[in-house]
Amino acid sequence: MERRLNVLMSAYACEPNKGSEPEVGWQWALQMARFHEVTVLTRANNRTAIQAGLESLRGRQPLPRFVYHDRHPFLMELKRRSRTVQWYYLLWQRSAREVIKRLHEVHHYDLMHHVTFAGFRYPVAVWGHHVPSIWGPVGGIESIPAGLLPWRHPASLIREGLRNAGNLLQVTPLSPLARRARATTLLLASTPRMQRTFARLGVQSRLMPPIGLNPAELPYRPRSPVEGPLRMLFVGNIIALKGLDLALEAHKAAGVEATLTLVGEGSYLSAAKGKAEALGLGSRVTFKGRLPREQVLRLYADYDLFFFPSLHDPGGFAVIEAMFNELAVLCLDCGGPAVAAREDCGIKVPLGPRPQVIAGLAQGIRWYAQNRSALARHGRAARQVILRDYDWDAKGEQMSRYYGEIHDS
């Protein structure tokens, strides 16, 4: 039996049953506690949810220990009022370094692992403590090409334009990213683009999607053939980066009987509704708003194709949930969705000029509408990919092997 290492994990976002990054932090904490003695440093704001989650699991598996830390209440209130988190996250990481230093003096950790936030842009607190460190999986390097930016939605255009500029600055050889990557014993990249970026900076990394599922806990209804129009589904935040303007234009251009249902809310919702109306899509597009996760999980089985043309998602929880439910995926060939949607379980449209991307998405809709046997085959293959590569238990075993490798090297 391999030695149980003494591990310090940094997870700013860490809460059960909340989805997105909080779920990632929570799952990595639980998984690594199966194999090692894990102490998780997280926000004090997460304490109530974490303690409830731990109580529900007590006696069923080894559990991590949590240490809670936050900045001064004045700064927390300022963060809440400003509705921005980046500046507070930077301050939290700076103070977390001192917390980790004090903990390490007492507990003498064998290695340290940063899991959330999973973005590459920020310094993290696990470096510089004279033990091996793991950073990731991290991602976020994908930028929206100029021709696909939301030019008719000014607020989103400003946000995405600034993000693009920030990404360009980060990938120069003298950027902070290069120094951060070299300070890390093992780098884990969420996407091939992130992996190539590290390689250009002279640092090797390993590819690992940051997200996963617990298949035994999810509802699953075997799919049966259904006649009638192709039923497409989108689940996620209704924001510009999800490419919903492209989805609506492709839906119109496809020229086949098909419907598109969108589940979610966000800053692009009003614009999306206006665009659907302007395109004359009428009853062929349905906006359901935000739904409880339990309801969404049951919803997948009522659709034929998952349509997710996101422009820079490093993960994509909804994509892997849909694939688990035997939905083929139509997406862009970028980010986390493209990693999940292998050749035999979806269609990935390359990035390029806007008319070309819309034409490619429209062709994907037409092809699936006219090839229902392929749609079913791709759906079955999609489920197998999730069961093989996105099961949290399997991911935990893989990460534990990485722990052993860097500790013994």
Image: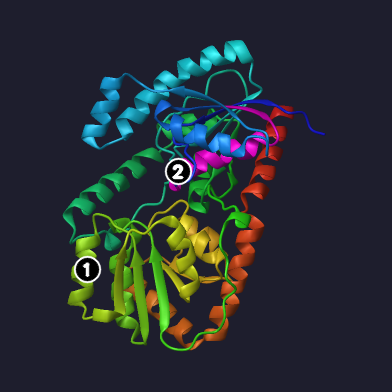
From where the camera sits, is residue 103 visible? yes
Report which residue position mark 2 lands on: 21
Asked if the residue at tag 1 contacts the one at tag 2, i.e. Cβ–Cβ closer than 8 Å, the answer is no
Helix, strand or loop: magenta stretch: helix
Q: Nearer the viewer, residue 339 or 308?
A: 308
Residue 125 in magenta? Answer: no
Distance from disc 2 to disc 1, alpha carbons, whole Å, reads 28 Å
The segment highlighted magenta reads 19-39
Q: From the viewer's perspective, is 31 left or right of 319?
A: right
Residue 305 percent location from the top left of the image: 46, 74
Q: Look at the picture and state if 160 lies above or below 1.
A: below
Residue 35: which disc? none
User: On the picture, is 355 further left or further right than 40?
Assistant: left
Residue 108: percent from left, percent from top: 64, 15
Q: Is residue 35 magenta?
A: yes
The residue positioned 28% from the left and 63% from the top of the image is 147
Per the rendering, the mark at residue 273 is 1
Instruction: State how many labels appear.
Output: 2
Q: Is residue 30 left or right of residue 82?
A: right
Where disc 2 sits, the SS reads helix
